[in-house]
């Protein structure tokens, strides 16, 4: 009698622990195309986590370095700076867009051309410190492309 009850409890605990792991969705990702010899570009998207989490890193095979950045006003000047993490509040979409949080792909290994797709891996950390990789194949948009106005900011 005790064994089936323990198995039922253990199974329930496993189900709960798997729900706690952040479930992250990404919508409308895109990367800005580059001109020959350009060494940096940006990646943009909407990220949402079912549970509280943080975006803590990014990688791409086309870039020697990939970093999380934020554009913010400092006095009268708009400045871009690297950030260690971007909070992903439970159930709330976070826009990575021009003028706010975004991803910088630097030390590009080659030109990134309109119409191609680029592999990108986001590293997300849940509230317990467990990390998850979110692998994406991101379309490259034209140099002058701009996402819809509803996706600006944080």
Image (cartoon, helix red, strand yellow):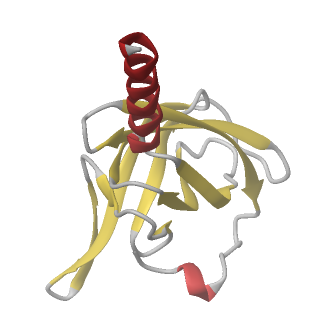
Q: Quadrant of residue 141?
A: bottom right
Q: Is residue 108 left or right of residue 75?
A: right
**Front-lying residue, 132 or 10:** 10
Marks counted in the figure total 0
Furthest-right residue in this view: 115
For the question of whether residue 66 can be seen, the reply is yes
**Front-lying residue, 6 or 67:** 6
Quadrant location of the N terminus in the rendered image: top left
Q: Quadrant of residue 73?
A: bottom left
Q: Is residue 42 left or right of residue 154?
A: right
Residue found at x 36% / y 14%: 2
Q: Is residue 97 left or right of residue 148?
A: left
Residue 12 drawn at (x, y percent): 44, 33
**Front-lying residue, 136 or 141:** 136
Residue found at x 32% / y 31%: 130
Vertical placement of residue 115 versus 3, above or below: below
Quadrant location of the C terminus in the rendered image: bottom left
Residue 9 drawn at (x, y percent): 38, 27
Furthest-top residue in this view: 3
Residue 53 drawn at (x, y percent): 34, 50
For the question of whether residue 41 can be seen, the reply is no
Furthest-front residue in this view: 1
Residue found at x 39% / y 54%: 51
Residue found at x 37% / y 18%: 6
Residue 146 drawn at (x, y percent): 66, 76
Vertical placement of residue 6 versus 136, above or below: above
**Front-lying residue, 59 or 15:** 15
């Amino acid at each position: 009698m005790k064994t089936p009850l323990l198995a039922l409890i253990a199974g329930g605990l496993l189900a709960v622990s798997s729900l706690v792991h952040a479930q992250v969705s990404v919508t409308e990702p895109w990367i800005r195309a580059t001109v020959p010899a350009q060494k940096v570009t940006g990646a943009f998207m909407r990220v949402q986590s079912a549970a509280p989490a943080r975006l803590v890193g990014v990688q791409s095979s086309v870039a020697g370095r990939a970093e999380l950045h934020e554009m913010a006003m400092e006095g009268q000047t708009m400045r871009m700076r690297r950030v260690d993490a971007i909070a992903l509040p439970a159930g709330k979409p976070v826009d990575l867009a021009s003028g706010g949080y975004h991803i910088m792909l630097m030390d590009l290994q080659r030109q990134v051309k309109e119409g191609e797709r680029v592999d990108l891996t986001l590293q997300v950390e849940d509230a317990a410190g467990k990390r998850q990789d979110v692998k994406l194949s991101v379309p490259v948009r034209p140099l002058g492309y701009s996402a819809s106005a509803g996706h600006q900011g944080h």
